[in-house]
Image: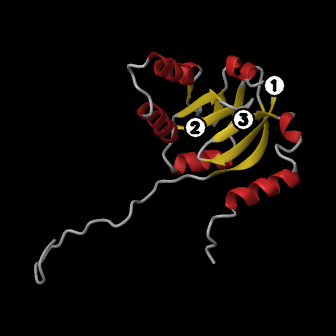
Amino acid sequence: MGDCGEKYVTLKPIYKIIDWMRLLGNIEARTDAKGRVFLPASFRKVLQSSQEECLVLRKDVYQSCLVLYPEKVWNEQMDMLRSRLNRWNPSHQQLFRQFLYDVEIIYPDSSGRILIPRKLLVAAGIDQRIRFIGMGDSIEIWNGDRTERPFIEQEDFIKALEDVMSDVPSSN
């Protein structure tokens, strides 16, 4: 830092600027016979503004759906998992291998379509009717029939939300 009267002073940033994207929405679509589907325009706009051309697709670990990650988000998750694993531990290596096993790199074509590989459609129980659900930093792809009923009943949702958020201080 400079003294009073110096011409130039180096300032240190006091916060980190977060490059964050918000992929939000619940959009129904249909795949064609080859498994191609138009990525919803609202998602394409967010991805383009974040300069995300490459996407990563995999079956969800917990649910019967697929998850589409922007490359930056995927790389952060993969790096976080790798940092918690020991390369010299065979069970850790097996876990990491399984995590990456069904990953597909996806590039939307010039029309905004993506090709969902048949093996992933089958693994997630998805037919032609699908639903895209924006999850903030990723997009879930569900069987359109599965999303006709709620994931959690309304009363259970309210109770779970109260439990999770009850100790969060109010911003008011």
Q: What amino acid does circle 1 point to?
A: Asp
- Mark 3 falls on what kind of element? strand
Mark pair 1, 2: CA separation: 21 Å
Q: Is residue 111 visible?
A: no
Task: Give how far apart the Cα atoms at labels 3 and 2 are.
Answer: 11 Å
Q: Which residue is mark 1?
A: 127
Rendered position, 90 above or below 6: above
- The reply to whether the C-beta atoms of the residues labelled 1 and 2 are less than 8 Å apart is no
Mark 2: amino acid = Tyr
Q: Which residue lies at the image location 76% right of the left edge and 28% below the top edge?
A: 31
Which of the marked residues, 1 or 2, is nearer the chain's N terminus? 2
Q: Residue at x 59, y 34 (%)?
A: 110
Q: Which residue is mark 3?
A: 141
What residue does disc 2 label? 69
Q: Which mark is residue 40?
A: none
Q: Secondary structure at mark 2?
A: strand
Residue 90: quadrant of the picture: top left
Q: State whether residue 14 is above or below residue 172.
A: above
